[in-house]
């Protein structure tokens, strides 16, 4: 009887404790949701989306033979891609959602768009072989990003990866792929848009992407906080002009 009496008197306090714990958990979940929709969390993701839009816009310019703007759009996408991760770390808003969004945006902006731009510029003259080069480059980009994501999740990155990438990173690969077109626009020479030369360059860049070659990372390069807002504004204005 005494044991039953003790249980009856203890049960109300136990119920109050459970209710308090439930309220605390609900408040924590609400706080996490509000944090996900805060301005600090949205700025890096918005920068990633702008990079995605810039990369896709390069295809539009290529279809209308505006090659200078197509090149500028891909370079702008690379600049924005370099900013989104830094903004997320600086604002304390890194998230798995942002990482996945960045990976998908990189594939489109640096794996698909440059390949299509170079196909419309010269590779179409090789017919099916030119399209095979486009597919090879895009597949190598997908494999490179999948390897990067897997290693970052499983913690299998090499010790030297703090200062170097494993293989050529996505933005650098995109710029290397369009380098012949940039040289053609600069010096007006048809040699640089020879489809065989472009095919060789794109295959070589694709192999470098999936290789184990260490590539220097500019992660350690810092932008002074007083200049950060100006750089962000310049990139957004440039992206608006391209679109």
Image: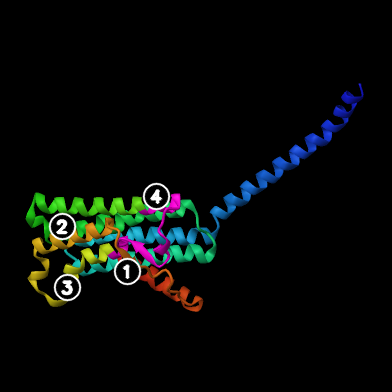
One can see residue 211 in this view: yes
Q: Earlier in the sequence, mark 1 or mark 4?
A: 4
State which quadrant residue 65 falls in: bottom left
Image quadrant holding the C terminus, namely: bottom left
Tell me the crowding category of disc 3: few under 14, some 14 to 19, or many 20 or more residues within 10 angstroms, Cα based: some
Seen at 33% across and 59% down, the residue is 53
Image spot of residue 39 (x, y percent): 53, 60
Q: Which residue is mark 4?
A: 150
Seen at 38% across and 70% down, the residue is 218
Tell me how far mark 3 sits from mark 1, CA to CA.
23 Å
Image spot of residue 40 (x, y percent): 53, 61
Q: Earlier in the sequence, mark 3 or mark 1?
A: 3
Per the image, label 1 sits on a secondary structure element best described as helix
State which quadrant residue 202 falls in: bottom left
Q: Which residue is mark 1?
A: 241
Image spot of residue 183 (x, y percent): 17, 73
Q: Which residue is mark 3?
A: 183
Image spot of residue 214 (x, y percent): 32, 64
User: What is the magenta range?
Assistant: 148-172
Q: Which residue is mark 2?
A: 119
Per the image, label 3 sits on a secondary structure element best described as helix
Seen at 8% across and 70% down, the residue is 191
Discs 1/4, front: 4
Tell me how far mark 1 sits from mark 4, CA to CA.
36 Å
Seen at 44% across and 59% down, the residue is 46
């Amino acid at each position: 009887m005494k044991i039953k009496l003790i249980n009856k008197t203890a049960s109300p306090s136990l119920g109050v404790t459970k209710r308090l714990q439930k309220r605390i958990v609900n408040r924590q979940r609400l706080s996490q949701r509000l944090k996900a929709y805060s301005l600090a969390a949205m700025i890096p993701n918005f920068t990633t989306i702008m990079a995605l839009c810039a990369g896709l816009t390069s295809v539009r310019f290529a279809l209308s033979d505006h090659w200078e703007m197509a090149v500028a759009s891909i370079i702008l996408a690379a600049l924005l891609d370099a900013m989104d991760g830094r903004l997320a770390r600086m604002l304390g808003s890194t998230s798995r959602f942002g990482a996945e969004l960045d990976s998908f945006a990189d594939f489109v902006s640096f794996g698909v768009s440059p390949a299509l731009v170079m196909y419309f510029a010269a590779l179409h003259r090789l017919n099916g072989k030119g399209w095979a080069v486009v597919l090879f480059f895009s597949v190598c980009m997908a494999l490179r990003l999948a390897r990067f994501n897997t290693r970052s999740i499983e913690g299998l990155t090499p010790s030297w990866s703090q200062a170097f990438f494993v293989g050529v990173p996505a933005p650098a690969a995109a710029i290397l792929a369009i380098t012949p077109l940039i040289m053609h626009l600069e010096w007006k020479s048809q040699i640089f848009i020879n489809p065989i030369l472009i095919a060789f360059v794109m295959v070589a860049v694709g192999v470098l992407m999936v290789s184990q070659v260490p590539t220097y990372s500019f992660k350690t390069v810092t932008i002074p906080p007083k200049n950060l807002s100006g750089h962000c504004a310049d990139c957004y204005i440039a992206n608006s002009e391209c679109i």
